[in-house]
Amino acid sequence: MTSSNIRFLGFSSAVGAVAVGVALYLVPEFASSTPTEATPVTDTRDDPAPQRFQVAEAQAGGQATAAATASSLPGGASSLNETYKDWRVACEQDGSAKRCALSQAQTQQNGQRVLAIELNAPSGNAVSGTLVLPFGLALEPGVTFQIDDKPAMQPVHFRTCVPVGCLVSVTFDAPTLGALRAGAALKVNAVADGGTVAPFSISLQGFGTALDRVATLAR
């Protein structure tokens, strides 16, 4: 960050749930960031299989109950977490309800969280979600997104601020998703309260694979 006006946050999974929806997707153990801030999660294999796969087995019950609440996740699991390079995929099954999302979080060297982004499973040809940014930003200008060196998109306004930071609702259409799949970084440009530029960068390594995986799991 380029401005001392930005107060970085230590997001907890419980409070992060208030901002983004479900604590499952913003847990402290997962963090990736730009090379100057922290060591990103990397995967040198070409195989799209996840680095880490954790499955919580579904609770056994009566046959009738099991039939009514059978999980559609792999192995009948009630939840799963997978990592694809710098992106995390998580799903949770609660009875007949299932929610899957992909996310990325960034931390400083001291462990304080800088930002978090969570995207829902694709709906039609678009993907929507929430970006959490730190306090100390000027809210009026909003933020602009830029994929690598492509032209910046139209500014997006902040939705609100909560104890973990300030929220931006994001929606990416089909052409933008195609560019994200082919890109290296999603640049997020904000303005600090003092007027200086406050840039952030979200790695796109593993984004396409993670998005495809979420789309498959959410069916």
Image (tube, helix red, strand yellow):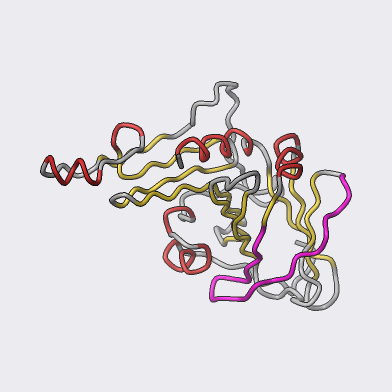
Residue 140 is covered by the magenta coloring? no
Percent position of residue 129, x then y: 59, 56
204 w.r.t. 109: above or below: above
State the residue in front, 142 or 125. Answer: 125
Picture residue at 58% right of the left edge, 68% below the top: 9
Answer with the quarter of the image where residue 137 lies.
bottom right
12 w.r.t. 192: above or below: above
Is 137 on the left or on the right of 59, as rendered?
right
State the residue in front, 93 or 106. Answer: 93
Is 11 on the left or on the right of 56, as rendered?
right
State the residue in front, 30 or 152. Answer: 152
153 w.r.t. 84: above or below: below
Is 152 on the left or on the right of 86, as rendered?
right
Outermost residue toward the left in this view:
62
Percent position of residue 195, x then y: 85, 75
Start-end of magenta stretch: 150-170
Picture residue at 45% right of the left edge, 55% below the top: 27
Is 130 on the left or on the right of 203, as rendered?
left
Q: Quadrant of the C terminus?
A: top left
Q: Quadrant of the N terminus?
A: bottom right
**Figure disc tally:** 0
Picture residue at 44% right of the left edge, 34% below the top: 52
Picture residue at 39% right of the left edge, 49% below the top: 98
Percent position of residue 88, x then y: 52, 43
Percent position of residue 58, x then y: 24, 42
